[in-house]
Amino acid sequence: MPPRRSYDQYCSAARALDVVGDRWTLLIVRELLAGPRRYTDLHADLPGVSTDVLASRLRDMERDGLATRRRLPPPGAANVYELTPRGRELLPVLQALGEWGQGELGERRPTDAVRAHWFALPLLRLLDGEGLVEVRLEEGRFHVYAGAGEGPLYGDGPAPAEPDAALALDTATCTALSRGELDLVRAVREGRVEVTGEGPLAKTLRETRHGR
């Protein structure tokens, strides 16, 4: 592989950008925080990236120790990419970047793509507790693992098991949460988020609605 481009500056921020500063790299990390993903799934959830660029970025991430590739056993028998522990250390970087970028969201443009699970990382910042949470939006469903130390942080579609809490909300509320205009406790208290489930997290959220 060709040598990695570098800013050639003895600065930790510059060194970090040497590794993750290329276009699409951090968004690939965002997708891989959901756990192992096939190349075709990554391409589908990164609208706008070319196949050549995606393949190149994945090779770079393997070289730099951010991601690995492995073969699933039968009946899956497909190659998947997943983050290394070093790659997972980028979570707080993405969280901070997302929080900083709240003010840049503005109104959704006609050209803006959207996937339901892109709201997962903003929501994880707002959840106080641990457990499996299913989120139901107009665009679809996704689930998050609040307080997860290892393994996937979120996934597309319904929760794979009985969730500790289920949140139903409309796009306007979810957008307001992502922009930082609304916090989850206030959204529940105002009836903009419907909470169901019997886990501790669901009970805590329901208690907030009644001011307890």
Image (tube, rainbow, N blue to C red):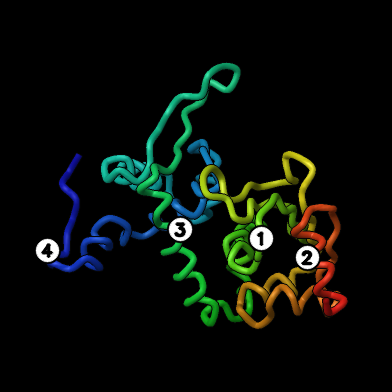
- Horizontal arrangement in the rendering, residue 58 relative to residue 9 (left or right): right
Q: Are marks 1 and 2 in contact (CB under 8 Å)?
A: yes
Q: Badge 3: how crowded within 10 Å, few (<14), some, or many (20+)?
A: some
Q: Which mark is residue 129?
A: 1
Q: Quadrant of the C terminus?
A: bottom right
Q: Nearer the viewer, mark 1 or mark 3?
A: 1
Q: Please tell me whether mark 4 sits on a helix, a strand or a loop.
A: loop
Q: Are marks 3 and 4 in contact (CB under 8 Å)?
A: no
Residue to which mark 3 is pinned: 91
Q: Please tell me whether mark 1 sits on a helix, a strand or a loop.
A: loop
Residue at 75% x, 79% y is: 186
Q: Nearer the viewer, mark 2 or mark 4?
A: 2
Q: Amino acid at mark 3?
A: Leu
Which badge, 2 or 3, comes first in the chain's sequence?
3
Q: CA gap, disc 2 to disc 3?
A: 26 Å
Which badge, 3 or 4, comes first in the chain's sequence?
4
Q: Quadrant of the N terminus?
A: top left
Q: Amino acid at mark 1?
A: Gly
Residue at 57% x, 50% y is: 148
Which badge, 1 or 4, comes first in the chain's sequence?
4
- Horizontal arrangement in the rendering, residue 135 relative to residue 6 (left or right): right
Is 68 above or below relative to 198?
above
Residue at 72% x, 53% y is: 133
Q: Quadrant of residue 180?
A: bottom right
Q: Badge 1: how crowded within 10 Å, few (<14), some, or many (20+)?
A: some
Q: Are marks 2 and 3 in contact (CB under 8 Å)?
A: no
Residue to which mark 2 is pinned: 204
